[in-house]
Amino acid sequence: MDASTSKLAIEQIAERITDAVMEHRLPPGIKLVEEKLASAFGVSRTKIRQALTLLAKEGLVTLHPNRGAFVTRPSAAEARDLFATRRLVEPEIVRNVIERACPGDLARLRAHLEEEAEARRQGDRRRIIRLSGQFHMLLAKVSGNSFIEKLMAELCPLTCLIIALYDEPQTPACPEDEHSDIVEAIAQRDETRAIALMLHHLHHIEQALHLDSPSERDIHWETLYG
């Protein structure tokens, strides 16, 4: 057992499992086998169990008595409900960001956009997926509303689950340039345009999903903590 991984805190394990979900390395519906996770992370099964309990509270994992833990597998109806919720919440995030964003916040957003662009140039789909979700969580953080930030911290990983289940593997997590257009509208304090762009962006992502035909993915346990 590697000393660096054996000292991982429960929250760190949960965060890495979340990253694996957001990067589509752990597909929806997969059983989370404690022995395999313990081996992958180099920790005890007790820590894995505690991390899975934490993730269950956040809705990312579903615990079934006598069956174990599974990555949550959202239904098509739940997918539609999630996007409906995001269409209610994210315009308010945009309004708050326009009111509160300082030059430093805009610099952070633009730096994040550059990370996304670099990931696209490298064709790194896993990183693109993770960064796409993090963009929306960064906006929530800049908005200054801690409750909305917590809500988005739950909605973004669940969105990644839905994308993993209902998109095509070749489909980008977020259409290119839509994030940058939103940031530029925010920088110009153009609330009407920024909100319209955000709503179009969410609609674009939802419309790209094949909600009647979930896809299946392979899993590689050894990559979970990398």
Image: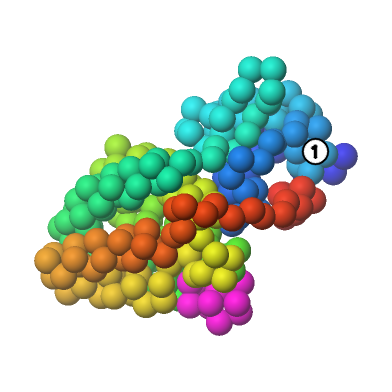
x, y percent for residue 135 = 40, 61
Q: In this rendering, is residue 163 above or below 59?
A: below
Name which residue lies at 59% across and 45% down: 28
Name which residue lies at 35% across and 70% down: 179
Name which residue lies at 41% across and 65% down: 208
Quadrant, the N terminus = top right
Toward the right, the furthest residue is: 1
Toward the bottom, the furthest residue is: 121
- Pick the front one: 42 or 172: 172
Give the prevailing secondary structure in the magenta stretch.
helix
Find out whether residue 66 is within the magenta segment.
no
Where is mark 1, residue-wise?
A: 36
x, y percent for residue 168 = 54, 65
Mark 1: secondary structure: helix
Q: Quadrant of residue 46?
A: top right
Find out whether residue 122 is within the magenta segment.
yes
x, y percent for residue 206 = 37, 58
Report the number of numbered marks. Answer: 1
Magenta segment boundaries in residue numbering: 115-124
**Would you say 43 lies left or right of 156 here?**
right
Decide: few, some or many residues near mark 1? Use Cα within 10 Å; few <14, some 14-19, many ≥20.
some
Q: What colour scheme has been applied to the protein in the rendered image?
A: rainbow
**Would you say 223 lies left or right of 91 here?**
right
Toward the front, the furthest residue is: 212
Q: Is any atom of residue 167 visible in this view?
A: yes
x, y percent for residue 164 = 55, 54
Q: Quadrant of residue 132?
A: bottom left
Q: In this rendering, is residue 84 above or below 63?
A: below
**Would you say 69 lies left or right of 128 here?**
right
Quadrant, the C terminus = bottom right
Give the residue type at disc 1: Lys
